[in-house]
Image (spheres, rainbow, N blue to C red):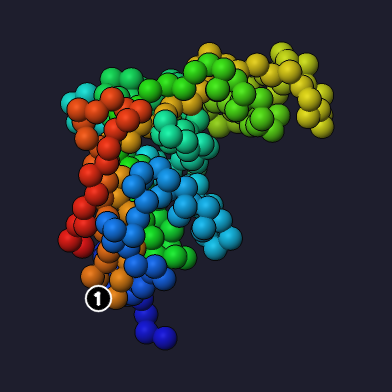
Amino acid sequence: MDALVHASPDTIKVVAHQQYDAPDTLSPTSVLPNPLDQFRAWFTSVQDSVKEPEAMAVSTATASGIPSSRILLLKQVDARGFVFYTNYDSRKSRELSENPHAALVFFWREVHRQVRVLGRVEKVSKEESEAYFRSRPVGSRLGAWASKQSTVVGEGDLHEQVIEIGKRFGVQDGDSDADIPLPDFWGGWRLIPTEVEFWAGKPSRLHDRVRYLRAETQPEEFSEWKIDRLSP
Ligand SMILES: Cc1cc2nc3c(=O)[nH]c(=O)nc-3n(C[C@H](O)[C@H](O)[C@H](O)COP(=O)(O)O)c2cc1C
C-alpha cells in the first residue's frame, strides 16, 4: 500500500485522498420537515455502525470572537435542542456565559456523514441536571466535584482531591449508592438550533448538503424551517 503520509523532519504532508460514498442520497425533498426529527432518524440509524456517535466537537467563542473547540458527549436531544453536561466554571462555560452562541459538529466516518448545528445556548434546569448527575457512576460524580475544570493543577492533586471528596460524602470503596449531590458549579447546557446541516459524502467531492434555517420571526414552538441544498 502507498504511504498515506509523507513525513520529513519538519513537515507532515497528508497525501491520502479519502473517498466518500454515503449509502443514502440526501435532498431537500427526501429529508424530514424538522431537523431534530431528521437528526433523530440519522442518530438512531448509526447506533450499530458508528463508535460513539454522541461524540461531537463543540465550538464556543469569547465576547470578542476568539473561538475554541473541544469534544463533548451529547446526552439528550428533543424538540427543545441538544444537551451536554460540563463544569459551569470551565473555559467553555465562561465563553458561553459571555457569548451564548455555539456550534456542534458530528463526524460519523463509518457512514460518511456529518451533521453541523448552530444556535444559542441556555443552561438546562437544575432538576434536569440533578436527574442526569444522579444517573452518573459514583466515580464520575466524585470527579465532577474534584476537578476545577480548565484550571492548572499540580501532579497528583486531582487524585488527592477525589479521596478528600469521597471522605466528605462518606463514600466507601465499591459504594454505588453513595449520596453525592449535584455541585452548584456543574450542569447542562442546551443548544437551541437555528441552523442544522446534514452532509453525506459522495465520490469526487460532489457531496450532498442539506441545510435547515429556522425562520427567525416565528415563535419557537411553531417555527418553520427553510430547507435548501448547498453546493459541496
Ligand atoms: C470523547 C470525549 C468526550 C468528552 N466528553 C466531555 C463531556 O461530556 N463534558 C466535558 O465537560 N468534557 C468532556 N470531554 C473533555 C473536553 O474535551 C474538554 O477537555 C473539557 O471539557 C475542558 O474543556 P474547556 O477547557 O474548553 O472548557 C470529553 C473529551 C473527549 C475526548
Location of residue 222 (image quadrant) = top left
Mark 1 highlights which residue? 204
Q: Split into 4 quadrants, where in the image is the N terminus?
A: bottom left
Estimate the x, y position of residue 158 in percent, counting from the top left: 59, 28
Residue 130 visible to an observer of this rendering: yes
Location of residue 139 (image quadrant) = top right
Total numbered labels placed on residues in the image: 1
Q: Is residue 137 above or below residue 165?
A: below
Give me the residue at 40% from left, 42% from top.
Answer: 36
Give me the residue at 24% from left, 28% from top.
Answer: 218
Identify the secondary structure beneath mark 1.
helix
Location of residue 92 (image quadrant) = top left
Crowdedness near tag 1: few (<14), some (14–19) or many (≥20) residues, C-alpha within 10 Å: few
Residue 91 visible to an observer of this rendering: no
- Left or right of 218? Residue 135 is right
- Left or right of 14? Residue 113 is right
Query: Which amino acid type corresponds to the residue marked 1 in the rendered image?
Result: Ser
Q: Is residue 24 above or below residue 175?
A: below
Give me the residue at 69% from left, 33% from top.
Answer: 137
Q: Is residue 212 above or below residue 207?
A: above
Give me the residue at 46% from left, 22% from top.
Answer: 124
Estimate the x, y position of residue 200 in percent, counting from the top left: 34, 63
| 108 or 2, nearer to the observer | 108
